[in-house]
Amino acid sequence: MKLADVVQKLDAIAPPHLAESWDNVGLLVGDGASNVSRAMLCIDYAAAVAAEAKAAKCDLVIAYHPPIFNALKRFTASDGSALVFDAARSGLAIYSPHTALDVAEGGTNDVLADILGVGDRRPLRVSEPKVTECKLVTFAPADEVEAISSAMFGAGAGHIGRYSSCSFRSEGVGTYFGEAGSQPAVGQAGRLEKTGEIRIETIVPLARVSEVIAALKAAHSYETPAFDLLTLTAPPTGVGIGRVGSFAAPVARADLIARVRHSLGLAHVLVAGPLDGLAQTAAICAGAGG
């Protein structure tokens, strides 16, 4: 299947927008149009993993930790980016879910919480909502509303969930005074004009603002179309890193440690603090927990 289709499924499991702001997740190396038939899972994309993936003729490596983390200014075969450079050169795609998988429902932290038997769970730290959209408000003559709206929708405006071409329209009166040198599309320069207009409101992704405004101006007959951009406050997500919850009945701490060791197939576990006594609640955090 196409790499783009695999990435779409991986993104559905661990949506990239759930990742911590400092993280680097998603498809890091690869061409979405390429074909994928074999994939390998790993924690870190190290030299041994690269060699194993090559021997197994894999097209994709899903590495929990991103091999590209900090910004890189060059990719060569002889420096710290050599593994990633070689992957790109050989056509091996690399995908990393990292903290997006930690936050996602059913992800890393939920798996650990399931092992412990923690119920009534919630995030250990709720993620700050990310502002990704704004509201665009503009005004147009009634006979231009459809053309202007269509132009903005075509440039990326008007998407709410599974709906497209979303807008709200209301009637009003616009006023303007054309100063010297102006060329109003309606009325004359040098006098106060009042004209009926339709107010158009629609949602625009922050990443598409420039394109939508350009489309608005191109479709509008006014010399200088008026518009407002209003930043939207993102609603609380209710998701976040880590988990904290309670047990149906108190559990011996030593039994909880045994559950972790057995379920994860560990030869040893490192424990800080006392092992005696009972636990009523537990906090879980995959990774460093910084």
Image (tube, rainbow, N blue to C red):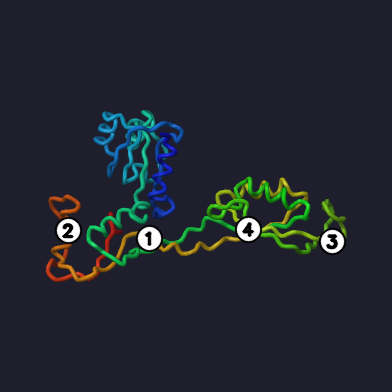
Q: Are marks 2 and 4 in contact (CB under 8 Å)?
A: no
Q: Residue at x 22, y 61 (%)?
A: 116
* Residue 213, percent from left and from top: 65, 50
Nearer the camera: disc 1 or disc 3 = 1
Q: Say few, some or many: other residues with alpha carbon within 10 Å of mark 1 (under 14 / 14 to 19 / 20 or more).
A: many
The residue that disc 1 covers is: 240
The residue that disc 4 covers is: 229
Mark 1 vs mark 4: which is more N-terminal? 4
In which quadrant of the rendered view does residue 133 lie? Answer: bottom right
Mark 4 vs mark 3: which is more N-terminal? 3
Q: Say few, some or many: other residues with alpha carbon within 10 Å of mark 2 (under 14 / 14 to 19 / 20 or more).
A: some
* Residue 141, percent from left and from top: 78, 55
Q: Secondary structure at mark 1?
A: strand
The quarter of the rendered structure image containing the C terminus is: bottom left
161, 100: nearer the viewer? 161
The residue that disc 3 covers is: 193
